């Protein structure tokens, strides 16, 4: 039939993911080869630890295999979907590795533009991080602080309320509204890119 390995190598990202979703082992190998540099690059750029980045990359591909059938092309490209999974896995891993919660006074440093130059294979990761940073900076300050305290600082809504000196309901609203705005803005850009 002529549909050997060279045919699989030429599949679009979406078709390749569909082949992965039905258990095609060669398609899985091609998929990893196609995305491994971007996934590892994003993880390494975000966490700054090669061993942790390798672990995150492995977990990212495991999640891709588990959820391949749930990919929806209307919500973005396969690349965007895979890098979103990687970003979430990196944040989860980073939180688990952190033994000391982030001091709220240090949050501003996290938003400062990066002065380090990324290698070529980290360019995509740098773009994604800069994009996320820009969207976080667009949030009103109370929402921005709540989102950063929760996502990077690992703080609960009750802890955020205490740190910010506001009622628990206010902290929850700031967090929910800020995260909702980020999801919407990032989703709109992903759809425009796809």
Image (cartoon, grey):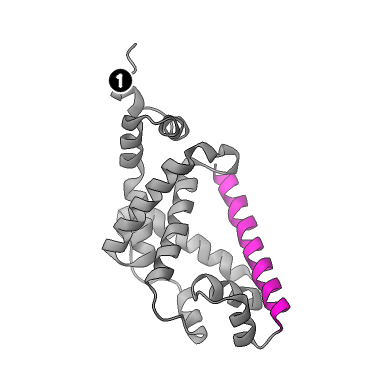
Residue 175: % across, % down? 64, 71
Bounds of the magenta segment: 167-194
Residue 191 covered by magenta stretch: yes
Q: How many marks?
A: 1
Residue drawn at x 32%, y 14% as measured from the top left: 2
Residue drawn at x 43%, y 47% as measured from the top left: 63
Image quarter of residue 87: bottom left
Left or right of 68? Residue 138 is right
Closer to the camera in the image, 18 or 190: 18
Residue drawn at x 36%, y 57% as measured from the top left: 56
Residue 128 covered by magenta stretch: no
Residue drawn at x 63%, y 77% as measured from the top left: 141
Closer to the camera in the image, 190 or 72: 72
The quarter of the image holding the C terminus is top right
Q: Which residue is mark 1?
A: 4
Residue 156: % across, % down? 58, 76
In the rendered image of this protein, does residue 64 appear above or below residue 160?
Answer: above
Residue 66: % across, % down? 45, 43
């Amino acid at each position: 039939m002529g549909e050997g390995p060279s045919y699989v190598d030429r599949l679009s990202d979406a078709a390749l993911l569909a082949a992965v979703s039905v258990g095609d082992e060669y398609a899985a190998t091609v998929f990893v080869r196609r995305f491994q540099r971007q996934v590892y690059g994003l993880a390494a750029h975000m966490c700054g630890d090669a061993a942790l980045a390798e672990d995150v990359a492995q977990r990212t591909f495991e999640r891709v295999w588990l959820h391949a059938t749930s990919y929806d092309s209307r919500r973005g490209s396969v690349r965007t979907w895979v890098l979103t999974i990687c970003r979430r896995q990196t944040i989860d891993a980073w939180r688990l590795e952190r033994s000391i919660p982030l001091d709220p006074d240090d949050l501003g440093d996290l938003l400062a533009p990066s002065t380090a130059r990324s290698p070529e294979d980290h360019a995509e990761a740098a773009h994604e991080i800069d994009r996320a940073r820009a969207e976080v900076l667009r949030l009103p300050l109370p929402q921005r602080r709540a989102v950063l305290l929760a996502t990077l600082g690992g703080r609960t809504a009750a802890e955020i309320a205490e740190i910010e000196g506001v009622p628990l309901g206010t902290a929850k609203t700031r967090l929910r509204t800020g995260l909702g705005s980020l999801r919407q803005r990032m989703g709109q850009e992903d759809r425009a890119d796809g």
